Amino acid sequence: MRLMIIGQLEGFISQAGKIALQKGAKVVHCEDSEQAIGALLNGKGADLVMIDVKQKIKAFIDRLNNERIHIPVIACGIGTDARAAVKAIQEGAKEYVPLPPDADLIAAVLEAVTEENNTMIAEDPAMKEVVKLADKIAPSEATIFITGESGTGKEVMSQYIHRKSKRKDGPFIALNCAAIPENLLESELFGHEKGAFTGATSRRIGKFEEAHAGTLLLDEISEMDIGLQAKLLRVLQERVITRVGSNDAVKVDVRVIATSNRNMEESIQKGEFREDLYFRLNVVNVGLPALRERPGDVPALAQFFADKYAEANGVPKKKISKEAQAALKTYGWRGNIRELENAMHRAILVSTEDEIEESAIHLQDGPAPAATQASTAQSSASSATVENPGGVESLIGQTVAHVERDLIINTLDHCLGNRTHAANILGISIRTLRNKLNQYKDDGSDIAASGAK
Ligand SMILES: Nc1ncnc2c1ncn2[C@@H]1O[C@H](COP(=O)(O)OP(=O)(O)OP(=O)(O)O)[C@@H](O)[C@H]1O
Ligand SMILES: [Mg+2]
C-alpha cells in the first residue's frame, strides 16, 4: 500500500504519515499537486492520495483523469469544516478526513479505499494443495500463469504470491488488460514520451517501469490484442521495454504474473492468443479450483464475508444457521467466491434472526449439475439452461435483444455494478459490455453504478 500525501495538512503531515506507516503503508510526501503529478508520471506510483483541502483538488483530479491515472483521492482539512468537505467531494475526492488525524479513521480509510484482498482462506484439501504449490514457487523468479473461472480468487492468489516472494518489499502493480481500451494499453504497459500521440501531453512511465523490483500482474491477459502480444513477448524475452514514441530501450526488473479465466488452448487454436507468449508466461501454472470443487472452503468463506460486511455496515456480526450452511454447501456457485461474497453481503443486511437464516440468503440458480461439473463459467451456465427448460420457455415471445438486455442488466446488478465481473460471468468482453450499457442508457434504462476497477 503506497500512500501519497500532498500539501502540509495544516502541520499534521508527520502525524498522518506516521499513522499510515504504522499501518504498513509506504508514504511519500509532495509539496503540492504539481509535484505530485510529476512524481506519478515518473513512475512513483501510489494506491491512495491524501491531499490538503487547500490544494487545487479539482485541477489535480482532472489532471489525473486526463492522464488516466486511477487513484482514489482523500481530502484532509482542519476539523469538520462541512463546506470544505462537501466541496472536496464535489470536486471528485472519495472521502473527507478531518484533521488532526485519528489513527482508527486513517486505518479504516486505508482499508476501505484500497480494498486490499489480503485474506487467503484455504480449508478444503483441494485449495490447500494449491496454496502449497504457491508457497513453493513464490520465492522463485518464475513467471506464473493463474487460471480459474471468474471469481475464484486469481487476484487474491497473485497478491499472495507477491507477498511470499523476495520482491515483497517492492511494488505490486496490477493492470487489467480487459478494462483498458486497446489503443491505450500499450502506453499503459510501457509508458510514452511527450507527443507520442494526440493527448500525450507529458512523458509518462508505464506499469512495467512502475513495477520495477516488484511484481506486475497482467490480469485477464487473454483479452490483449494480438499485435501487443508480440511486443509483450519481446519484453519478456529481452527484459527491456521501449516507451511509445521513443527508441530507447529501458531495462526492467519485473516478475510477471498473468491471469485468465478463458481456456487458453482454445484461444490459441482460434488464433486469438500467441502460443509462444503463452509458453513464456506459463512457466508455472496455478489452477484455482471452482468453488463447487472445494466445498470445504464454503463455510469459512461465508462466515468471513458475513463478518466483513457486518463490520463495514455497522451491523452486529452473526453466525450462520445450520440450514443456511447446508444450502450454501449444496449450491452451484457459478460466480464462485465473488457470488458467495455478494450473497453474504446481502444476507447480513436482510437477516432478522439471531443467526443468519436460510431465507436471508438469496441464491439465484440451483445446485451444480452433479454429473457434469463444467470447467468454465460459460459452459456451466448453458448446462443449467438445459436442465431447466421451463426457464427458457417462459422467455418465448420476447425478442433476443430484449432478453439480452435483461440478462445483462440483471447480471450487472448481481455483481453490484462491477463491470469486470459482470462481463466475465456473461462471457463477453468488457468493451462489448460497455457498448451495450451505453446503448441501454441512451434508451433510458437504469444501469447500476460502476464499481469496476
Ligand atoms: N481464498 C480466498 N479467501 C478469502 N477471500 C477470497 C479468496 N479468494 C477470493 N476471495 C475474495 O473473492 C473475491 C473474488 O476474488 P478475485 O477478485 O481474486 O477473483 P478473480 O478470480 O480475480 O475474479 P475475476 O475473474 O472475476 O476477476 C474477492 O473479493 C476476494 O477478496
Ligand atoms: Mg480478477
Image (tube, grey):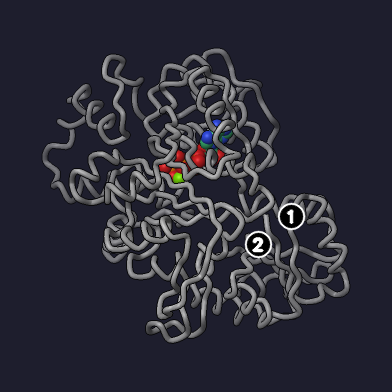
Q: Residue 198's image quarter? A: bottom left
Give x and y (percent) for residue 430: 34, 55
Q: Callout 1: 10 Å neighbours few (<14), some, many (20+)? A: some
Q: Please give the label number shown on residue 25.
A: 1
Callouts 1 and 2 close, C-beta under 8 Å? yes
Does residue 415 appear in this view?
no
Residue type beneath disc 2? Leu
Is 105 rendered above or below residue 135?
below
* Apparent side of residue 156 relative to residue 258 in the rendered image (left or right): right
Mark 1 lies on a secondary structure that is loop
Question: Which residue reaches farthest front?
Answer: 238
Give x and y (percent) for residue 320: 60, 21
- Ligand 1 within 8 A of label 2's CB? no
Give the mark, 1 or 2, whose residue is nearer the N terminus: 1
* Apparent side of residue 107 relative to residue 256 in the rendered image (left or right): right
Q: Residue at x 25, y 26 (%)?
A: 384
Q: Residue 92's image quarter? A: bottom right
* Residue at mark 2: 48
